[in-house]
Amino acid sequence: KAGVTQTPRYLIKTRGQQVTLSCSPISGHRSVSWYQQTPGQGLQFLFEYFSETQRNKGNFPGRFSGRQFSNSRSEMNVSTLELGDSALYLCASSLARNTGELFFGEGSRLTVL
Amino acid sequence: TQLLEQSPQFLSIQEGENLTVYCNSSSVFSSLQWYRQEPGEGPVLLVTVVTGGEVKKLKRLTFQFGDARKDSSLHITAAQPGDTGLYLCAGEETSGSRLTFGEGTQLTVNP
């Protein structure tokens, strides 16, 4: 079956702009989690959605937001981009809540200039 | 949030050598997972350990969960260039609310 699909794979933005990233989970998976990966910080948890509801949130400012649709697809949005937002944003899906095996997408590489 | 520390951060070895990667915390985890991430890819699950003291083997990889469920190790025997990648440990918090990842160990196996 198809894996987790993230779009776009690469994007370049400038400071102050906003960006929306998309994630399509594995068919049948209802939980979607988002992580930010940077060389110095590793994988930092952003948030988790399950059945269209945000179930858990990491320690990120309010500029980072997300949502999940009825078909389990998820989007995350970052507003007023800062240089430090440059990172690989990874989406992971799982059958149940944010535990058990996570299936990751290839990520969206965001560069903020 | 419970924290996980991995060591070493970087490891460069020759093909055929053995190595061990450590994942430590002061907190207890319900379970611990190990992932491997290759360039341009997302992490892929290697194993999940659940019981304190548990040892799991996956070909040349041996995973151990500490008796107190606070730490874990990954041992690779006779490393091969194909083992090159970023190895991440991830602990399931006892509250069951999230997975916490370590910063990873970047392994390079030179032919």
Image (cartoon, rainbow, N blue to C red):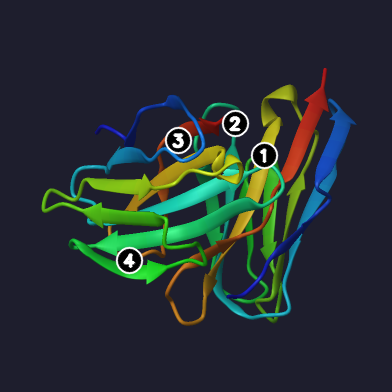
What residue occupies the far left of the structure in this picture? Answer: A70
* Residue at disc 3, secondary structure: loop
Which dot, 3 or 2, sits closer to the camera? 3
Do the numbered discs 3 and 2 sit on residues whose CB atoms are within 8 Å? Answer: no
Counting residues from the start of the chain, the first of labels 1 and 2 encountered is 2
Q: Residue at x 67, y 80 (%)?
A: B27
Residue on which the image places disc 4: A97
Q: Which mark is residue A107?
A: 3
Do the numbered discs 1 and 2 sit on residues whose CB atoms are within 8 Å? Answer: yes
Counting residues from the start of the chain, the first of labels 3 and 4 encountered is 4
> What is the spatial separation of the Cα atoms under label 3 and label 1, in whole angstroms?
15 Å
Residue nearest the viewer, comparing A19 with B33: A19
Q: Which mark is residue B86?
A: 1
Do the numbered discs 2 and 4 sit on residues whose CB atoms are within 8 Å? Answer: no
> What is the spatial separation of the Cα atoms under label 1 and label 4, in whole angstroms?
25 Å
Subunit of label 4: A
Which dot, 3 or 4, sits closer to the camera? 3
Measured from the top left, where is residue B58 in percent x and y? Answer: 60, 45
* Kind of residue at disc 2: Glu
Q: Residue at x 42, y 56 (%)?
A: A63
Quarter of the picture holding the C terminus of chain B? top right
* Kind of residue at disc 3: Gly
Q: Which mark is residue B38?
A: 2
Subunit of label 1: B
What residue occupies the far top of the structure in this picture? Answer: B111
Do the numbered discs 3 and 1 sit on residues whose CB atoms are within 8 Å? Answer: no
Residues marked 3 and 1, same chain: no
> What is the spatial separation of the Cα atoms under label 3 and label 4, in whole angstroms?
20 Å
Q: Residue at x 30, y 40 (%)?
A: A23
Residue nearest the viewer, comparing B5 with B45: B5
CA neighbours of label 3 inside 10 A, class few (<14), some (14 to 19), many (20+): many
Query: Looking at the image, is B90 positioned above or below residue A1?
Result: below
